[in-house]
């Protein structure tokens, strides 16, 4: 009797919860916030704003960009963990938060289980760019200069443990060169530092570099993907010039706090995938040097696992120590 009563009570509770959820207005019924874990101007910020604008049109609700830089994504991740699990606050996530930080921090205030992986959106090659005062037009030429005068040159990144640091440290380890690392809070600071010759080199995605490259204020000398970028076809890959098989490009996705209702996750993932695969959006993102991916939680999980394995190998090869 008691067991039957408990089951009936549980069933009634589920029915009430289901009815309450069904009575909620369709998602989204108000503004959605995209939290970017870096300062304005970098790849996550660019993608967040481009996709957010189109989603705002599709949803009929504002998509607000909120920059919360710090700790290579840790600050933003902690903020997201404390938000309601309703899909209205999402983080524009690159591989730093979940694929790099676990190998470069001794401890983190979050785990993967604390988040909902909603949508995989894009992947973008990174470029190595130098100040034009340096007498090199290719990566091999720069490597020759660096070997001839160790520690004369420096490079700027988006912070300790960033993908930019991993790229250059893996290049240094593979080629036996010494180049000083200067961490910044984001490409909004590191790229201008390279333009001003405060650092010799910077590693960044194409959107942050294209204007300076066209004006001759920076010189692109290598790209991190296996194939050359159609936006800069004269720039050779690291793989073809110095390190065979080299291929590293950060992904961008949307994550939220754990417990977002599956229906909301499906809605967001479907709409984001539809938006990024629109011909006009594909062309626009390609024009920014960004390759469209598109996918839901399953595709996000697969990409996460692939990049974690790749990053672990690089961290060991480069001897990067945990903070």
Image (cartoon, grey):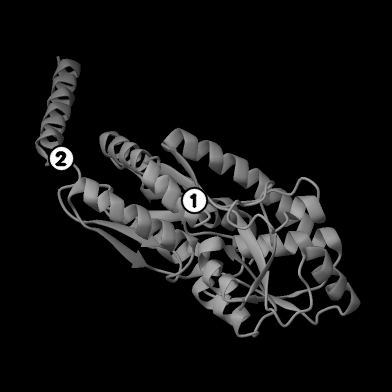
- Number of labelled discs? 2
Q: Position of residue 240 (x, y in %)?
A: 79, 50
**Is residue 214 shown above or below 264?**
below
Q: Position of residue 207 (x, y in %)?
A: 50, 63
Residue with the mark numbered 2: 26
| Residue at the (42%, 63%) spot, across then down | 45
| Residue at the (63%, 75%) spot, across then down | 218
Residue with the mark numbered 1: 286
Mark 1 surroundings within 10 Å by alpha-carbon count, few (fewer than 14), some (14 through 19), many (20 or more): some
Q: Position of residue 146 (x, y in %)?
A: 83, 74
**Is residue 277 shown above or below 203?**
above
**Is residue 206 shown above or below 298?**
below
Q: Is residue 251 left or right of residue 9?
A: right
**Is residue 206 shown above or below 263?**
below
Tell me the CA gap for discs 2 and 1. Answer: 32 Å
Q: Nearer the viewer, residue 253 or 134?
A: 134
Mark 2 surroundings within 10 Å by alpha-carbon count, few (fewer than 14), some (14 through 19), many (20 or more): few
**Is residue 115 shown to the viewer in this render?**
no
- For the C terminus, the image quarter is bottom right
First in sequence, mark 2 or 1: give its number: 2
């Amino acid at each position: 009797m008691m067991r039957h009563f408990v089951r009936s009570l549980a069933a009634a509770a589920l029915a009430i919860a289901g009815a309450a959820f069904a009575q909620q207005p369709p998602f989204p019924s108000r503004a959605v916030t995209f939290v970017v874990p870096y300062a304005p101007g970098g790849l996550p910020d660019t993608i967040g704003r481009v996709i957010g604008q189109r989603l705002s049109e599709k949803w009929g609700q504002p998509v607000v960009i909120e920059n919360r830089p710090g700790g290579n994504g840790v600050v933003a991740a902690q903020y997201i963990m404390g938000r309601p699990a309703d899909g209205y606050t999402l983080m524009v996530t690159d591989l730093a938060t979940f694929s790099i930080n676990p190998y470069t921090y001794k401890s983190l205030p979050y785990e993967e289980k604390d988040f909902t992986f909603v949508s995989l959106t894009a992947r973008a090659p990174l470029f190595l760019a130098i100040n034009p005062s340096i007498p090199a037009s290719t990566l091999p030429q720069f490597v020759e200069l660096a070997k001839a005068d160790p520690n004369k040159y420096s490079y700027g990144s988006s912070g300790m443990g960033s993908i930019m640091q991993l790229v250059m440290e893996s290049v240094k380890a593979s080629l036996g060169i010494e180049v000083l690392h200067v961490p910044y809070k984001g490409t909004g600071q590191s790229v201008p530092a390279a333009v001003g010759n405060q650092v010799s080199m910077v590693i960044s995605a194409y959107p942050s570099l294209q204007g300076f490259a066209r004006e001759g204020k920076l010189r692109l000398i290598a790209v991190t993907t296996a194939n050359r970028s159609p936006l800069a076809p004269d720039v050779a890959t690291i793989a073809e010039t110095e390190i065979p098989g080299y291929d590293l490009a950060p992904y961008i996705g949307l994550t939220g706090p754990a417990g977002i209702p599956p229906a909301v996750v499906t809605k967001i993932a479907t709409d984001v995938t539809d938006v990024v695969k629109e011909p006009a959006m594909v062309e626009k993102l390609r024009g920014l040097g960004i390759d469209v991916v598109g996918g839901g939680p399953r595709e996000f999980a697969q990409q996460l696992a692939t990049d974690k394995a790749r990053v672990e190998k690089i961290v060991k090869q480069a001897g990067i120590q945990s903070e």
